[in-house]
Amino acid sequence: MSMIPKKLIDGVIAVTFPEVLGKFDELEIHPCQQDDEGNVSVCDPEQAHFWTLYYHLTDGGLDCVADFYTKEDAESLRKFLYSFARYNNLQL
C-alpha cells in the first residue's frame, strides 16, 4: 500500500476539496504524458509518464487534484477522499 504524503492530503482537504465540493460527482484517474513543450494529455496506460487524479465536474470537464508516479498512489488518495467525504457526511 502506498503512503500519500501528509502535506498533500492536508493541501487537498484544506484547499481544493472545499472549493469543488458539490461541484463534482466522481474522482477519476487517467494515465497522462507530457510532450516537449510541457503540454499534458491523457494517453494509453503503456505510454503514461504519470497518473493524474481528477475531479469530474458536474458542469463538464475535469479539474486536476494531483499527479502521481503510479496508478496505485493515485488510487490511494482517491480512496482516502471518498472515505473522508463519507466519514464527514459530505455530499459529493
Image: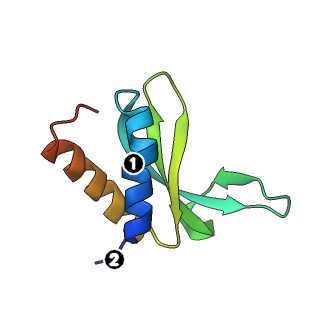
Residue 12 point in image, percent of width and height: 42, 52
Q: Is residue 92 left or right of residue 9?
A: left
Residue 91 point in image, percent of width and height: 23, 31
The answer to which quarter of the image holds residue 19 is: top left
Are the residues at dot 1 and dot 2 in contact (C-beta closer than 8 Å)? no
Amino acid on which disc 2 is placed: Ser
Identify the residue shown where x is 72% and y is 61%.
Answer: 34
Task: Measure how far apart labels 1 and 2 are at the Cα level.
Answer: 21 Å
Residue 44 point in image, percent of width and height: 58, 59
Identify the residue shown where x is 84% and y is 64%.
Answer: 36
| Residue indicated by mark 2 | 2
| Residue indicated by mark 1 | 14
Q: Secondary structure at mark 2?
A: loop
**Which of the two labelled residues, at mark 1 and mark 2, occupies the earlier sequence position?**
2
Identify the residue shown where x is 63% and y is 69%.
Answer: 49
Crowdedness of circle 2 by 10 Å Cα count: few (<14), some, many (20+)?
A: few
Q: 56 or 12: which is nearer to us?
A: 12
